[in-house]
């Protein structure tokens, strides 16, 4: 009987058994050397596990040279192996041939920001729009990138130029009002700002409407806009805002959702020795090669590692991963009884524990995490690995992990409802829908490991 090693490898990858996946996919490539899918999958898993992957991608490209997804990941592998100029060159060359390749533009912009080239991060978009001035999709993707980077003045200018060239369109109007609301423009406090797109149903736009209503001091309107989404696939975008609305309205539903003070926030000692923490710190520091955080990240004054940390075949990382999976299982077992419809308590707890993402953060002097949530996760975390000295960190609560504080740009004035003092070797678990932040450290460095647990289906 013929064994389908490609199918086995892809199944193992889905189960996050990356070493098993790599072994099976290597067999698939050996037995089917001209199979482009097997070649791509093998290169991809090498890349995802932090191994050298450039040669494998080049073999895959020889079988499927026009695959844009393959080219994009090949460029990422080059950058990961220190060949950032070649990575940019390949992306620029491909974009010159395919100027409407939106994922390629985003990949190049992300790479440039991470390598300290913020001043020219959107250059490829500018070139493509100059070549194809009538492309609305290009212009909207460029505007979205600038908005994600909070380059509000540039985003407004792009909207104005697009309107002048292309005339009015629904997409440009949505972009305009979103930028006016989020970017602190002269119309940011206009209660009628969204009237022109009142009939447009879109989760992203409705999220802007919710934030706008909260900023204007109208939690009732925000609640009415957000609540219908709890029964949709977009619920995790809106649960954090429901918590803000209910808290402002003193509605007991807020306690139902987030729990009292520390009900769902748990600190767990992983039992790591000083030697293990030191080994983990050394391994993590070696992975912090970026010069700046990525555009969409909450990290301020520090860096975050790329790719899934827990997929890397580093013995100390895998040791910590095993301990974390056991800690998460204990956390789940200790939660209150299941409650249908609740974002933390509703999903089944008897499924395999899979990671939606895992990474390390290195904060430097003045560094912190801004207020945020994790809409792609179910349970989120912080494992403190190395902390500044007492003298360097600053007076309490410097360096603390805080929960419940509202995003400052919404001007709600809601302070933290709970906080946790960081301790090396202590894992903090909490619902991904909880608003959280870290208080800036004064000096020194704060090294941590974090992950999101995937919501089980």
Image (tube, helix red, strand yellow):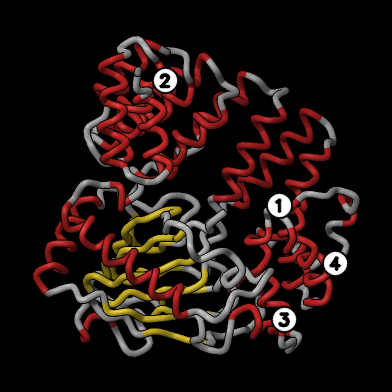
Residue 443, by quadrant, is bottom left
Closer to the N terminus: mark 2 or mark 3?
A: 2
Residue 289 in picture, x, y percent from top left: 25, 48
Q: Which mark is residue 83?
A: none
Q: Nearer the viewer, mark 2 or mark 4?
A: 2
Q: Tell me the CA gap for discs 4 and 3.
A: 21 Å
Q: Which mark is residue 191?
A: 4
Image quadrant in which the N terminus is located: top left
Q: Is residue 302 left or right of residue 414?
A: left
Residue of label 3: 246
Closer to the N terminus: mark 1 or mark 4?
A: 4
Q: Which mark is residue 37?
A: 2
* Residue drawn 41% across the image and 81% down it: 266
- Callout 1: few (<14), some (14-19), or many (20+) C-alpha neighbours within 10 Å? few
Q: Which mark is residue 204?
A: 1
Q: Tell me the CA gap for discs 2 and 3.
A: 49 Å
Against 116, residue 247 (above or below) is: below
């Amino acid at each position: 009987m013929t064994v389908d090693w490609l199918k086995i490898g892809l199944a193992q990858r889905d189960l996050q058994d990356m070493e098993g996946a790599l072994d099976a996919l290597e067999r698939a490539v050996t037995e089917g050397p001209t199979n482009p899918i097997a070649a791509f999958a093998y290169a991809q898993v090498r890349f995802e596990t932090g191994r050298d992957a450039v040669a494998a991608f080049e073999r895959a490209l020889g079988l499927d040279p026009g695959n844009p997804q393959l080219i994009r990941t090949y460029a990422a592998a080059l950058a990961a192996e220190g060949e950032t100029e070649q990575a940019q060159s390949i992306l620029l060359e491909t974009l010159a041939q395919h100027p409407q390749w939106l994922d390629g533009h985003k990949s190049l912009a992300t790479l440039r920001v991470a390598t300290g080239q913020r001043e020219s991060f959107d250059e490829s978009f500018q070139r493509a729009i100059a070549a194809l001035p009538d492309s609305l999709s290009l212009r909207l993707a460029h505007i979205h990138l600038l908005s994600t980077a909070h380059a509000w003045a540039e985003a407004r200018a792009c909207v104005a130029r697009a309107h002048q060239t292309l005339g009015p369109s629904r997409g440009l109007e949505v972009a305009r009002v979103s930028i006016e609301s989020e970017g602190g423009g002269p119309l940011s406090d206009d209660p009628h700002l969204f009237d022109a797109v009142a009939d447009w149903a879109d989760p992203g736009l409705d999220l802007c409407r919710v934030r706008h209503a909260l900023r204007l001091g109208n939690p009732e309107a925000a609640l009415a806009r957000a609540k219908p989404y709890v029964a949709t696939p977009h619920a995790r975008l809106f649960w954090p805002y429901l918590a803000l609305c209910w808290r402002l309205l003193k509605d007991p539903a807020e306690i139902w959702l987030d729990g009292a003070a520390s009900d769902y926030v748990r600190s767990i000692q992983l039992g790591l020795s000083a030697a293990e923490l030191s080994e983990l710190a050394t391994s993590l520091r070696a992975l912090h090669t970026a010069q700046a955080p990525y555009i969409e990240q909450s990290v301020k004054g520090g860096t975050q590692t790329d790719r899934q940390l827990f997929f890397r075949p580093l013995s100390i990382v895998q040791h910590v991963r095993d301990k974390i999976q056991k800690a998460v299982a204990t956390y789940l077992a200790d939660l209150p009884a299941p409650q249908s419809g609740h974002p933390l308590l509703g999903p089944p707890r008897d499924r395999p524990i899979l990671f939606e993402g895992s990474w390390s953060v290195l904060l430097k002097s003045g560094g912190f995490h801004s207020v945020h949530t994790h809409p792609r996760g179910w349970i989120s975390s912080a494992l403190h690995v190395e902390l500044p000295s007492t003298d360097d960190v600053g007076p309490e609560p410097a360096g603390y992990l805080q929960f419940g504080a509202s995003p400052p740009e919404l001007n709600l004035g809601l302070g933290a409802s709970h906080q946790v003092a960081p301790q090396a070797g202590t894992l903090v678990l909490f619902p991904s829908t909880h608003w959280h932040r870290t208080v800036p450290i004064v000096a020194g460095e704060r090294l941590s490991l974090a992950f999101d647990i995937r919501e089980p289906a």
